Amino acid sequence: MPVRRCSGTRILHTDSFKRGKGKFHTWAFEESPEILSNSQEYPYILTTGRGLEHYNSGTMTRRTPNKELVKEDILYIHPHDAGVKGVKSGDYVNICSERGQTTMRVRISDIVKPGVIYTTFHFPEAAINLLTSSVGDEYTLTPEYKVVAVDFKKSFQKLFVNGV
Protein backbone atom coordinates (compact mmCIF):
# COMPACT_ATOMS: atom_id res chain seq x y z
CA MET A 1 0.00 0.00 0.00
CA PRO A 2 1.51 3.38 -0.94
CA VAL A 3 2.32 5.88 1.80
CA ARG A 4 -0.21 8.67 1.87
CA ARG A 5 1.36 12.07 2.29
CA CYS A 6 -0.44 14.94 3.96
CA SER A 7 -0.64 18.14 2.04
CA GLY A 8 -0.60 21.52 3.70
CA THR A 9 1.47 24.55 4.36
CA ARG A 10 5.06 23.63 5.18
CA ILE A 11 5.78 26.99 6.80
CA LEU A 12 3.01 28.83 8.57
CA HIS A 13 2.68 32.59 8.78
CA THR A 14 5.00 33.53 5.93
CA ASP A 15 3.12 36.72 5.04
CA SER A 16 0.97 37.59 8.03
CA PHE A 17 -0.44 36.38 11.32
CA LYS A 18 -4.11 35.50 11.52
CA ARG A 19 -4.67 37.34 14.81
CA GLY A 20 -2.11 40.09 14.30
CA LYS A 21 1.36 40.32 15.77
CA GLY A 22 2.11 38.83 19.15
CA LYS A 23 1.93 41.02 22.22
CA PHE A 24 4.97 40.93 24.43
CA HIS A 25 5.41 42.43 27.87
CA THR A 26 8.58 43.08 29.80
CA TRP A 27 9.16 43.80 33.44
CA ALA A 28 12.21 45.22 35.14
CA PHE A 29 14.32 42.64 36.98
CA GLU A 30 13.37 42.17 40.62
CA GLU A 31 15.48 40.10 42.96
CA SER A 32 13.68 37.15 44.51
CA PRO A 33 12.24 37.80 47.98
CA GLU A 34 14.00 34.58 49.01
CA ILE A 35 17.39 36.05 48.15
CA LEU A 36 16.58 39.47 49.61
CA SER A 37 15.55 37.91 52.93
CA ASN A 38 18.13 35.15 53.31
CA SER A 39 21.28 35.71 51.27
CA GLN A 40 23.34 37.10 54.17
CA GLU A 41 23.08 33.90 56.16
CA TYR A 42 22.65 31.56 53.17
CA PRO A 43 24.94 32.82 50.38
CA TYR A 44 24.40 30.08 47.77
CA ILE A 45 21.43 29.56 45.47
CA LEU A 46 20.01 26.05 45.25
CA THR A 47 18.07 25.23 42.11
CA THR A 48 16.39 21.93 41.35
CA GLY A 49 15.37 20.16 38.18
CA ARG A 50 14.74 16.85 36.50
CA GLY A 51 17.13 14.29 35.08
CA LEU A 52 16.58 12.23 31.96
CA GLU A 53 16.31 8.89 33.75
CA HIS A 54 13.53 9.74 36.20
CA TYR A 55 10.27 11.63 36.03
CA ASN A 56 9.41 14.03 38.87
CA SER A 57 9.77 12.25 42.20
CA GLY A 58 10.49 8.96 40.48
CA THR A 59 7.32 7.28 41.75
CA MET A 60 6.94 5.52 38.39
CA THR A 61 10.47 5.39 36.99
CA ARG A 62 12.07 4.05 40.17
CA ARG A 63 9.92 0.92 39.68
CA THR A 64 11.70 0.26 36.38
CA PRO A 65 15.28 -0.65 35.46
CA ASN A 66 15.94 3.11 35.43
CA LYS A 67 16.52 2.79 39.18
CA GLU A 68 19.85 1.16 38.32
CA LEU A 69 20.90 4.06 36.07
CA VAL A 70 20.54 6.78 38.72
CA LYS A 71 20.26 5.59 42.31
CA GLU A 72 20.27 8.87 44.24
CA ASP A 73 20.00 12.61 43.87
CA ILE A 74 23.46 14.20 43.60
CA LEU A 75 24.35 17.78 44.48
CA TYR A 76 26.37 19.56 41.78
CA ILE A 77 28.81 22.20 43.04
CA HIS A 78 31.12 24.44 40.98
CA PRO A 79 34.86 23.69 41.46
CA HIS A 80 35.50 27.18 42.91
CA ASP A 81 32.80 26.80 45.58
CA ALA A 82 33.93 23.26 46.35
CA GLY A 83 37.48 24.56 46.87
CA VAL A 84 36.28 27.30 49.22
CA LYS A 85 34.37 24.73 51.29
CA GLY A 86 36.99 21.95 51.09
CA VAL A 87 34.65 19.54 49.34
CA LYS A 88 35.44 16.99 46.63
CA SER A 89 33.34 14.66 44.46
CA GLY A 90 31.95 11.78 46.49
CA ASP A 91 31.89 13.72 49.77
CA TYR A 92 28.66 14.29 51.62
CA VAL A 93 27.57 17.83 52.43
CA ASN A 94 24.94 19.15 54.76
CA ILE A 95 22.76 21.69 52.92
CA CYS A 96 20.64 24.06 54.97
CA SER A 97 18.15 26.84 54.40
CA GLU A 98 16.06 28.76 56.90
CA ARG A 99 13.45 25.99 56.61
CA GLY A 100 15.48 22.82 57.09
CA GLN A 101 18.49 20.74 56.19
CA THR A 102 19.43 17.56 54.43
CA THR A 103 22.58 15.70 53.42
CA MET A 104 23.60 14.70 49.90
CA ARG A 105 26.55 13.30 48.01
CA VAL A 106 28.49 15.81 45.88
CA ARG A 107 29.68 15.90 42.28
CA ILE A 108 32.06 18.73 41.39
CA SER A 109 31.23 20.14 37.97
CA ASP A 110 31.30 23.33 35.97
CA ILE A 111 27.77 22.67 34.71
CA VAL A 112 26.72 25.04 37.49
CA LYS A 113 27.91 28.62 37.94
CA PRO A 114 29.84 29.73 41.00
CA GLY A 115 27.37 30.55 43.76
CA VAL A 116 24.75 28.09 42.44
CA ILE A 117 24.28 24.47 43.48
CA TYR A 118 21.93 22.07 41.70
CA THR A 119 20.21 18.77 42.30
CA THR A 120 17.28 16.78 41.01
CA PHE A 121 14.25 15.92 43.16
CA HIS A 122 13.61 12.33 42.06
CA PHE A 123 14.29 10.72 45.43
CA PRO A 124 11.94 11.86 48.21
CA GLU A 125 14.29 10.38 50.80
CA ALA A 126 16.80 13.12 49.89
CA ALA A 127 14.13 15.56 51.14
CA ILE A 128 15.40 18.46 49.08
CA ASN A 129 11.95 20.06 49.07
CA LEU A 130 12.23 20.62 52.83
CA LEU A 131 14.62 23.44 51.94
CA THR A 132 12.34 25.25 49.50
CA SER A 133 9.91 28.01 50.35
CA SER A 134 6.32 28.72 49.43
CA VAL A 135 7.16 32.20 48.12
CA GLY A 136 5.23 32.66 44.90
CA ASP A 137 6.04 34.57 41.76
CA GLU A 138 3.59 37.48 41.54
CA TYR A 139 3.24 37.23 37.74
CA THR A 140 2.86 33.48 37.24
CA LEU A 141 1.37 32.80 40.69
CA THR A 142 3.53 29.68 41.02
CA PRO A 143 5.84 28.73 43.89
CA GLU A 144 9.45 29.74 43.39
CA TYR A 145 11.10 26.34 43.83
CA LYS A 146 14.06 27.21 41.61
CA VAL A 147 15.63 29.85 43.87
CA VAL A 148 16.44 28.77 47.41
CA ALA A 149 18.99 30.59 49.58
CA VAL A 150 21.19 27.90 51.16
CA ASP A 151 24.58 27.22 52.63
CA PHE A 152 26.45 23.95 52.73
CA LYS A 153 29.35 22.38 54.56
CA LYS A 154 31.21 19.12 54.38
CA SER A 155 29.65 16.39 56.46
CA PHE A 156 31.84 13.64 57.87
CA GLN A 157 28.88 11.27 58.04
CA LYS A 158 25.68 10.88 56.14
CA LEU A 159 23.12 12.50 58.39
CA PHE A 160 19.46 11.82 58.21
CA VAL A 161 17.07 14.55 57.18
CA ASN A 162 16.93 17.46 59.65
CA GLY A 163 19.71 15.90 61.75
CA VAL A 164 17.51 13.05 63.05
Image: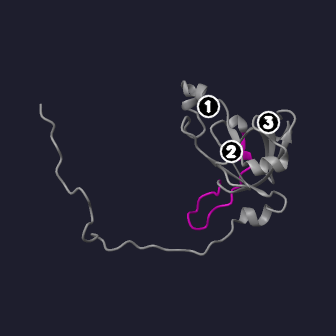
Depth check, mark 2 against mark 1: the one in front is 2
Q: Is residue 130 magenta?
A: yes
Name the amino acid, label 2. Answer: Ser
Q: Earlier in the sequence, mark 3 or mark 1?
A: 1
- In the drawing, what numbered circle is on residue 70? 1
Q: CA distance from mark 3 to mark 1?
A: 17 Å
Picture coordinates of residue 65, whole percent (x, y): 54, 24
Q: Is residue 163 left or right of residue 121?
A: right
Give the residue at x 38% y 71%: 22
> Disc 3 designates what residue?
91
Q: Nearer the viewer, residue 118 or 20?
A: 118
User: In the image, which residues are magenta?
Assistant: 127-145
Above or below, 134 against 103 in this view is: below
Q: Give the quadrant of residue 59.
A: top right
Residue at x 67%, y 48% (from the top left corner):
110
Q: Secondary structure at mark 2?
A: loop
Q: If you read the primary sequence from the N terminus, does the residue marked by circle 3 or circle 2 appear first?
A: 3
Asked whether residue 100 appears in the rendered view, the answer is no
Q: Which residue is mark 2?
A: 109
Q: Residue at x 66, y 50 (%)?
A: 112
Considering the numbered disc 1 on the image, is that residue within a helix, a strand or a loop?
loop
Tell me if residue 122 is in the magenta stretch.
Answer: no
What percent of the width, then of the height, locates residue 121? 64, 41
